[in-house]
Amino acid sequence: MAEYKIIVSGPIGAGKSTALAAVSDSAPVTTEACNTRRFEADKATTTVALDYGEVALGDGDVLRLYGTPGQDRFDFMREILARGALGLVILLDAQRPDPAADLRHFVVDFKLDEASLPFVIGVTKTDLIDDVDALIGSLYAQLGDMHRMAPCFSCDVRERTQVLALLDALLALIETADSP
Amino acid sequence: MSAEPTTPRHLRYAAMSGPDEILLRSMLALLDGQTREHWQLAKGDEQADLVIIGCADAEPVTVTAARRRARLCATVPVRFEHGDLELPQPLRPRSLATLLDNASLALTPPRDAPAFAQATRSGRDQDGNKPTLADLLYSLMQQPPADQDAIVVELDSRALMRIDVARGRVQLDSAADVIHAAARCDAHARAAGRDEHVHLNAQPLTPLLWSVGLAHQHALVAPARAIDSIIARRWPDFGRLPHRGDHLRMTAHLSRQPMSTDQLATVADVPAPVAIGFVNAMLLGGLASLSPANIQQPLAALVQPAPAPVARSALFARIRARLGL
C-alpha cells in the first residue's frame, strides 16, 4: 500500500477547506474552531490544526490531501505537513489587501525559493474584484522577483472542475520535472 | 485613462432634481483627470458638447432648449425621450465616467480608416500571403496601435469584432463558430469610426485570443519566418479558459525550457497541428515568447526517458483516471 500527499495552503479564508471538500472521496476531516480573528476573515469558524481528505487510487494506494491552517500562529504545522509531499497548492484570496505579499509569505514559509517542491497558485474570489488580469500579473511579477515560475490562475474552489484543473496543472508540473 | 492637456469638453444638464444636480457637480469634480478628456460645466448660453437630461419634471421647452445647445444628448433610462447615450440611475461616479468617455469617443471625428488599413493591418505580407484573422490579431497584440481607440476587424467587409487593445476588451458582432471559422480566413482591420467605439462593459479579449489561436493550426505569419523556439512566460488562466489535459502538459513543458513546435508535439505526445495551435494561442495571449535558436535543445535530449519516472507516470495516470481528469 502506497501513500502520496498533496498539501493545500494559503491565508485564512482563501478556501482551502472548500477546495479539499470538492475533490475528496468523502467528507474531509476538519479541525474547525471558533474564529477569534474575524478581522482577518469574516467567517464563523476556521481550521486550527489541519483538514484532511483522501482519494483512493485502488490496490490500497491512497492520495492524501492536507489543508494547512491559514492563521500564522499555526505556521509550524506547514513545514511538518509538507515533508514528503508530491506538491503544494497555494490558494490566495483575491480580496485580501495584498495577495502578492501573501504569495511571498507562503513561498518563503515553505522554503519554495530553495527547495524543489512543485507548487501551483490558485487565486480565489476573483469574481469579486474588477481586474483579475492585473492581479495575476502582479503575482507573476512577485514570482519573477523570487526567480520562480509556477502556474498561477483563477480558481473558484466551489467548482470541482476548477480545483481539479489546479491539481492537473500540479501533476503536469511534477511530470515534466521528472523528465530530464 | 488619462486626460490630455487639450481643450476641455463642456457639459450641460437639464431636468435634474436638486440632489442629483449636487451629486453630478460633485462627481464631475471627483472625476477630474480620471476621464479620457477633461470635462467641465458649460457657462451661460455657450454651446456644450453633451447635455444630460435628468428625470425630474421640467418644462418641455427648457429641455428642448438645453438639447439644442449641445452636440450630444444623454438621458436617464426612465425618461420617455431618447438621447444618443444613457446615464443609469442612481448616479454613480463610474457610470458618469463611462458616459463621458463614450461621449468623447462619439465626438471625436473618425480617422482616416483606409490609410490606416493600407499602412499597417491589411494587404499581403512580404511573401504575398494574406493575413488571416489569427495573423491579424497577433500583429495587433505585438504592436498595439498607439493612436487608435478601437480597431474594427472585418471579414469580407463584414464587421466581426471591435477591439480595444489598451483595455483588453472586445465586442463581438458574430457568433463564436463564425469567429472560429474565420481564424483561418483572410481578414483585415481598420480604425473604428465615431459610432464604433467599444463599450466599456464589452467582454475580455483574452478568451477570444485563446480560442482563435487554438483554432488556427498553422504557424502564425510572423513567427513562421523567425521562430526558433518558444518559451512560456506565464500559464494561461485555466480557471477562465477552456482547456484539455494536453494544454496543461504543453504549458508545463514550455515553462521549463524553450522548444520548437515539433519538439513540443513530440514530448507532449500530440499531433503537430495541435501543438502549433497551442503555441499560437500562447503567442496571441502574450503568454509565450520567442527564444534564440541557440537555447533550443536537441530533440533527443528532451524526449530521453528516465528510468525512475516510469512508476511515477503510472501513478499520475491513476490519479487522473480516479479524479476524472
Image: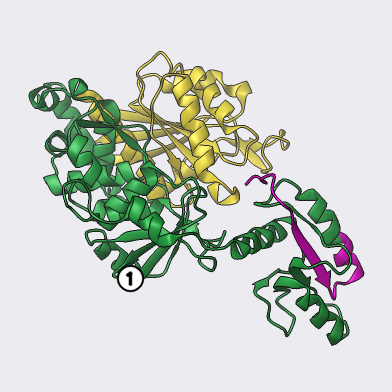
Chain colours: A yellow, B green
Is B107 placed left or right of B318 in the picture?
Answer: right
The residue positioned farthest toward the top in the image shown = A114
* Residue A94 visible somewhere in the drawing: yes
Q: Chain of mark 1?
A: B
- Label 1 Cα neighbours within 10 Å, binned few <14 / some 14-19 / many ≥20: few
Give the amino acid type for the residue marked by disc 1 in the picture.
Ser
Residue at position x 65%, y 59% in the image? B98
Image position, residue B217 (x, y; %) = 19, 51
Instruction: Please tell me whether residue B9 belongs to the stretch shown in magenta.
Output: yes
Instruction: Please tell me whether residue A147 belongs to the stretch shown in magenta.
Output: no
Q: With respect to residue B199, does A160 lie above or below?
A: above
Quadrant of the rendered image containing residue B92: bottom right
* Residue A1 visible somewhere in the drawing: no
Q: Nearer the viewer, residue B111 or B257?
A: B111
Image position, residue B131 (x, y; %) = 24, 54
Residue at position x 17%, y 25% in the image? B309
- The boundaries of the magenta stretch are B1-22
Residue at position x 35%, y 29% in the image? A5
Image position, residue B31 (x, y; %) = 75, 50
Residue at mark 1: B157
Q: With respect to residue B299, does A18 lie above or below?
A: below
Is A52 placed left or right of B4 in the picture?
Answer: left
Quadrant of the rendered image containing residue A3: top left
Residue at position x 51%, y 29% in the image? A68
Callout 1 secondary element: loop
What is the count of numbered marks? 1
Q: With respect to residue A12, does A44 lie above or below?
A: below
Q: With respect to residue B7, does B268 lie above or below?
A: above
Q: Nearer the viewer, residue A177 or B220?
A: B220
Q: Nearer the viewer, residue A172 or B284?
A: B284
Quadrant of the rendered image containing residue B28: bottom right
